[in-house]
Amino acid sequence: MRAEIISVGTELLLGEITDTNARFLASQLPGLGIDLYWISQVGDNQVRLVEVLRRAWQRSDLILITGGLGPTEDDLTREAIAEMLGEELKLVPALERELQEFFARLGIDMPPTNLKQATLIPSADAIRNVSGTAPGWWVEKDKHILIAMPGPPREMQPMWHHHILPRLRQSTTGEIIVSKTLKTFGLTEAKVGEMVSPLLAASNPTLGIYAKVDGIYLRLAAKARSQKQAEEMIAPGEARLRSILGEYIWGTDSDTLEAVVGHMLAEKGLSLAVMEGYTGGLLAATITDAPGASTYFKGGLIAGSEEAQIAYGVDAGVISDCGASSREAAQAMAGAARLRLGADIGVGIAGVDEPGGGEGRPVSTIYIGIDDGKNKRATTARYPGDRAWVKRRAVATALFKLRKILATAG
């Protein structure tokens, strides 16, 4: 079954909100064995929406639409579907009663404009919305299924789970798509592609490669009649990828670097402290995103100036000789954080954030120090992009380096 997702709303095209609905629906389809081929966004314009719907009707078996089911004049999804199918919208008394009851429970009069939410075309069944006033639509016609859902995720997702997903399961072929994602760090996307190129030609399972802030991901996906069969198809490819990429792999599927590192720290009974300059507390905030971080994370110090570094215990001579943004400073920050907060391991991050800083070093040059009381290590990295992106990459680099050290520690 070929599927297409259409997200409706001018606010999407203006960049005012992020289209999380399409991402959510895309993640739901593989488990149904449904192939997603296209995702579109269209504004609140009936002519353009009808054009997008007609194109989807010609090429897709399943069309999932979110947005445009509200009560205002610019909510035009119902009207566009009716025009595309050549059917007439009619008020449904049962839906009108449900709307009246909804507003009565709130103790307010229903605005007349809400009546449009009680309309249907002959080919459509209403889908109950327990979280709002906009019923969804389920349309089956000419071997196509078209499903329209409200735009707010708090309304759309319950509707999907309780009413749409169970019904779709009855309409699918019985095949499912199972995927396994391996997450790597320390290699470029091009380099990973070269290393695993023999596996890219396979059709089932398939291998996809894409870049994220915390490294390069490799996704193996297999279509089969059962979960077990798909997993058996994926296993040889996963084993081969692991043999090729080795220590560059840091996790799988829903793993995060902070959770992986946190689990290793907890397992080994070790504690961690950090001192940050360039990243301004982002490393500490990321570490505490992992459940149970309070059991191993002593705390973080933000040192945005030489004075702060010295106050937290960094040797003034290191700063005088090497600069506050240097490998030596990052290493000293790691040691100072470890000692000041009484941790087993300290991590320091320094970086050049403006032209001419760091003794003439290039902007976005990052220095990461790690001190476990026995060994002192420092890493230099430079990433392209704006400051927010470089900060996130610096945090990922620090966590990956820490993971490597923990993996070899006794």
Image: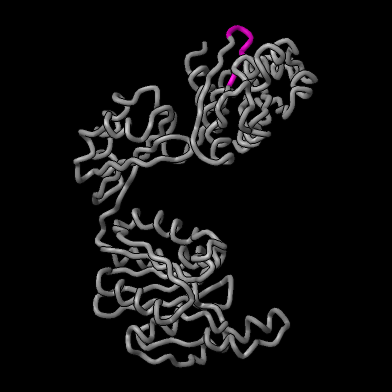
Quarter holding residue 28: bottom left
Q: Which residues are magenta?
A: 368-375
Decide which of 332, 250 is in the foreground and name it: 332
Name the residue located 53 percent from the left edge and 32 percent from the top edge: 396
Q: Would you say 135 lies left or right of 359 here?
A: left
Residue 77 percent across, percent down from the top left: 45, 79
Is-magenta flag for residue 329?
no
User: Residue at image x 45%, y 92%?
Assistant: 90
Judge left or right: residue 131 versus residue 39: right
Q: Is residue 344 visible?
A: no
> Looking at the image, what colour scheme do you see?
one colour
x, y percentage for residue 166?
39, 65
x and y percentages locating residue 120 in the rendered image: 44, 86
Residue 64 or residue 130, whichever sits in front: 64
Look at the picture and state if 166 lies above or below 229.
Answer: below
Q: Residue at x 64, y 27 (%)?
A: 357
Left or right placement of residue 386 versus residue 174 in this view = right
Residue 350 against residue 33 in the figure, above or below: above
Q: Determine the image quadrant of residue 46.
A: bottom left
The stretch drawn in magenta includes residue 373: yes
> Where 336 sits versus 225, above or below?
above
Task: Give the vertical position of 111 relative to 59 (above or below).
Answer: below
Residue drawn where x is 32% and y is 84% of the image = 85
In the picture as drawn, the residue positioned furthest to the top comes out as 374
Residue 129 visible here: yes
Q: Is residue 6 left or right of residue 301?
A: left
> In terms of image quadrants, where is residue 319?
top right
- Quadrant location, the N terminus: bottom left
Q: Position of residue 158 (x, y in %)?
A: 52, 64
